[in-house]
Image: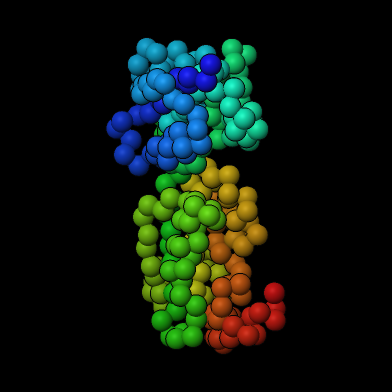
Amino acid sequence: MGKVTLFLISDPSCEKCNDLGILISQIKQSGIRIAVEKNLTPNSAEGKDIINKYGIDFVPALILSKDAGVYQLIQQAWSQIGTKEEDGNYVLRSVNPPYINLTTGKLRGLVNAIYLTDKSCADCYDVSVHEQILTSPQSFAIRLDKEETFDVTDATGKELILKYNITQAPTIIISDEVSAYPSSQALRQFFSLEKDGYYVFRTAQVMGSYKDLATGQVVKQQQAEGQI
């Protein structure tokens, strides 16, 4: 009783995929005894059998044998992140990107970011703070891949302003891959979802002082706080 077999199905060629090692370490540290740990690939015979049996549509994937059910933590918390199958085994259904979609074979969840700055605004908030917030495991836990910075006076900056009708700077634009994250729903409190699937930050007042591009005036932090 309580000797658990853990199956980890992952693609070793996917260097940017989410690492489930942290979750596995947490499982072990919680007192769950992992007696056998099997590392499988989605193309192996056993990996394919498990994927088909449980209808798994992404890797990395994690399965615990039914022996995990004797642990109170699994009884209380597993339903928040996975399912208990008819054979008693536990399948992880919620995983943070990046992951490989097994239906399309595509890597999901590598997000590109474009920072739009205004070098003439010395009092404007530091746009790099967005990176800290978006990538923090305590907030949105988004994996940023390619990051670029343009000024509002640059040709590309002007194109972005026109394309997305941007009225505040600094700001950040993130690519449509962010939709792979469950946290993307929460982003809509601060970002607009554009027709091309990109997200544009629209609430500079919550960050600090910013430039109103329509008037050319700097909205100071004290003024911005009064507008929230």
Q: Residue at x 53, y 29 (%)?
A: 92
Locate residue 149, reporting x and y percent: 38, 67
Residue 102 in the image: above or below residue 45? below
Q: Residue at x 43, y 31 (%)?
A: 60
How many badges with numbers are in the image? Answer: 0
Locate residue 11, reporting x and y percent: 35, 29
Q: Residue at x 62, y 62 (%)?
A: 190
Q: Is residue 175 visible?
A: no
Residue 107 in the image: above or below residue 38? below
* Depth order, front residue of 123/19: 19
Residue 199 in the image: above or below residue 79? below
Quarter holding the C terminus is bottom right
Q: Is residue 197 left or right of residue 34?
A: right
Q: Is residue 109 left or right of residue 16?
A: right
Locate residue 154, reporting x and y percent: 38, 74
Q: Is residue 42 left or right of residue 192?
A: left
Query: How is the protein colored in the picture?
Result: rainbow
Locate residue 212, reporting x and y percent: 57, 80
* Depth order, front residue of 79/187: 79
Q: Is residue 200 left or right of residue 12?
A: right
Q: Is residue 70 visible?
A: yes
Q: Residue at x 65, y 85 (%)?
A: 223
